[in-house]
Image: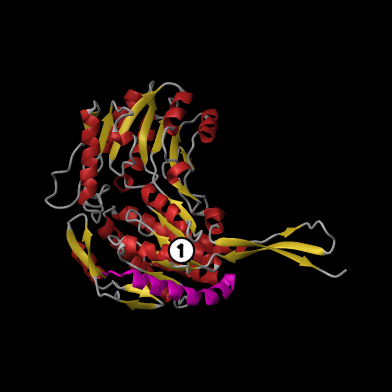
Amino acid sequence: MISTQAESLEMARTQLYIDGVWVDGQNGATLEVINPATEEPIATVAYGTGSDARHALEAAQRALPVWQKTNVYERAAKLKKIADLMRENVDYLATALTMEQGKPLAEAKGETMASAATFEWFAEEAKRAYGRTIPASANNKRLFTVRHPVGVCAAVSPWNFPLILQARKLAPALAVGCTTVSRPSSQTPLSLLRLFELMEQVELPAGSINLLMGPPAELMTEFMENRICRKISFTGSTEVGKELVRNSAQQMKRLSLELGGHAPVIIFPDVDVESVAKASVIGKFRNNGQVCICPTRFYAHKDIEKDYLEACVEETKKLVLGNGLDPDVNIGPMFENRALDKTDAIVQDATSKGAQCLTGGGRSNQFERGYYYEPTVLTSVSSDMSIMTEEPFAPVMPIMDYSDIDEVIAKANDTEFGLAAYVLTNDLSAAFKMAEGLEFGTIGINDTVPAAPQSPFGGLKESGIGRENSIEGMDVYLETKAVSLAIQE
């Protein structure tokens, strides 16, 4: 079974896609893609340069007038066809995603279907990119607004969600008439390469979509310095996001930034402990905790903290670790060896400062190869531990107690991040108080997987600028032009 899937990878495209053509990079460089479950190479892909990025931007610029003038209903039909093709080829896409990134196949299929839903939603929403008429202060004037696509856009995404994070950028940009250049993580390009194979079937104008793998800094420099690129949508670390903000000043280049997070989970005493423990464990260990909105700090009310802790440990021990292609597995490998080292470091830091490890706590010894770490639950966690201050992209679940609602809101908000927060309660008053008091862009109340194409996604504070998904996610690819028309009376 696995060998057959590997053979299908060998038949897939591995080149850059520029101006409607599959091409090698100008310098002929390549890069191996490694399967984190086996540490074995599964594909060799073209690895471009800044010159390739320039070529792609120029192609997108040439395609812009054609795609911009394409009727919105025709653009929508093409995006809807992309969504249909993704659903028809979900196994093809998801297999590549699991093999390059490590997540279980069920999660990879879920990501693929969510990406298809994103293309479909923006296909429909583009038809509602309305301008408006404005009452004028003079009788001989007519005021109205016109929405105009930003232009050529760069879509830059990381390795943890190779499909959905690109879909959130490509779908709205294409829907409103922008053209695009995509730069996925060089370590996880295979699922996006397969998506571009499918998009090629839709016969978009040559140059309207482009795909590059290459050195991140070199490609980003070209995006930032080349005036053809009017907007960059970036998902990644807060550190890199800040650098982009500084560099964007030279051209006042438009940015959308979805950056780091450190999501609190607040559990109230009125919940069914076993059910919320199960939901907490699912939310925490999804994609091995390598999720920007992943729950990272759990505050259980002192009246239920002991029972909640025991239930979480029991649920965590049920998780099956292994190769994501195995249908019985629900926790795959971590993405790379460096992630294992970081996870080890934060667990050792916590336990050296008094935290207790109730399950997990180390690299798995079940496998000869692969980047496997045991799902871990910690208690007796304090604010001076690195797991409480740094974004822990790791399968580690720290659980603390609280007694006062205002106190726990203050603790939850005591972070530079503001991407997502979670509340588990059946108390409507408490739910409203938490929704209003928590300083986070997305708040899941009894929902640990809250993202949806129709709901805005983004962060407060240092977790980002702008929103993806929903009407806000389309607006960032549009300019508003005001028109004042004087008429003869």
Vertical comparison of 226 with 165: above or below: below
Along the horizontal axis of the image, is 448 left or right of 467? left
Residue at which label 1 appears = 170
Instruction: Provide residue 296's location: percent of width, then percent of height.
Output: 35, 38
Count the marks: how many?
A: 1
What's the amino acid at mark 1? Leu
Q: Quadrant of the N terminus?
A: bottom left
Q: Quadrant of the C terminus?
A: bottom right
Q: Is residue 291 visible?
A: yes
Tell me which segment is drawn in magenta. 46-74
Q: Is residue 326 magenta?
A: no
The overriding secondary structure of the stretch rendered in magenta is: helix
Q: Quadrant of residue 9?
A: bottom left
Q: Nearer the viewer, residue 191 or 415?
A: 415
Instruction: Provide residue 488's location: percent of width, then percent of height.
Output: 85, 70
Residue occupying the far left of the picture:
368
**SS at mark 1 in the image:** helix
Q: Nearer the viewer, residue 469 or 245?
A: 245
